[in-house]
Amino acid sequence: MELLSAPGLAGIAILAVQPKERAAVLACLETPAGKPCRVESGQAPLRALMRLDGHVVDDVLVVARSHERLELHVHGAPAVLDQLDRHFGVAIVAAHSPAELLLREALCPEQFSLAVEQLQFDFAAELDALRVLPVADRAREISAARERSRVAQALVEPVRVALIGQQNAGKSSLFNRLLFRERALTGATPGLTRDAIAEVTTLAGYPYELVDTAGEGRAESNLDAAAIESGRSWRSGAFLILVVDGSLGPQGSDRELAAISDLVVSSKSDLGQADWPVGMARDVEISAHHDSAEAARAAMGGLLARLRGLPVSGSGIAAGPDVCNGFGQLGGFAALNEVERQQLIVLDADCSAGPSSA
């Protein structure tokens, strides 16, 4: 069997039954009345029960695509697919393009929308079409394609965001809020987070590897010192969000951390806000207890997108000239991986260096 639909936690999985498997598969199917299934070409889809090892494992839909070729529409739960794999073998058809791969692995509506849009483009053919344009048009179209590709890269590839700050500043509470689940331990006891926790999530449509790090502060033991040092190691190459307990104001090394941070969050806004030093940034105030997860995610997603120079509007990608054209869409072909990006860069360099065309 071949899995035609995207692998993962899908509601329905579509499987192609090869001609050599047809008889064995039909032998495992029966009508709801318990009679053998008879499937003919051109027949309407047939509801059937699949019985394996004497037990009914799923209620399936049998579709006859031709005299020999069948499709099974089964429930996509891993337990069902695992049993089918053990009995018949289920092969996952390889994605033929970056857009197909993104369609299978999309984490949010924006990624799914981008994948559907880009499936209509043949990247190589689009590059060929650019090569024959008049020089002015070609330069403009290549520039637009590179900008679309920059936004597409941000939609496809997670970047790291590390939460830093003092112990008990509210980093883990914000981390859980942004993930929509209780992933990290939280509480009044300082130093609960020892090992950094990293999870991928999407904010305002863009994927991020969000990291909750151990808090700065006095190390009471060698373990504490190791945890703090380990947390610092996650900062390299990451966007840094400094979380400050707003009810206390900046403490300890917060001023030094603010100087290396991209954003500063004042947490625990429900407890009141202490005086804030003049000249020290404070980008947003958040309460993990009073603000909804949606509000926290929208606020942080919007700040990060604007920091990166990316379009954003509410919970989705904004419409804008030459970049976006609707929810999650770019409005034209774009490079979705490094290979395609390099091809676009090479074309840009070749066209810039070569003779102009009329």
Image (spheres, rainbow, N blue to C red):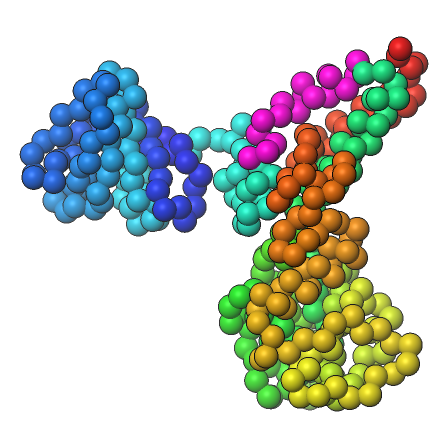
Would you identify the image quadrant in which residue 45 lies? top left
Percent x, y of residue 178: 60, 66
What is the tally of numbered marks visible in this picture? 0
Residue displayed at 63% across by 51% down: 316
Q: Which residues are magenta?
A: 116-132
Percent x, y of residue 209: 64, 57
Residue displayed at 64% across by 78% down: 287
On-image quarter of the N terminus: top left
Residue displayed at 52% across by 43% down: 105
Q: Is residue 253 above or below residue 115?
A: below
Percent x, y of residue 109: 55, 47
34 or 342, nearer to the observer: 34
State whether the magenta stretch is mostly helix, strand or loop.
helix
On-image quarter of the C terminus: top right
Q: Would you say residue 308 is visible in this rendering?
A: yes
Q: Is residue 146 magenta?
A: no
Q: Is residue 246 above or below residue 258?
A: below
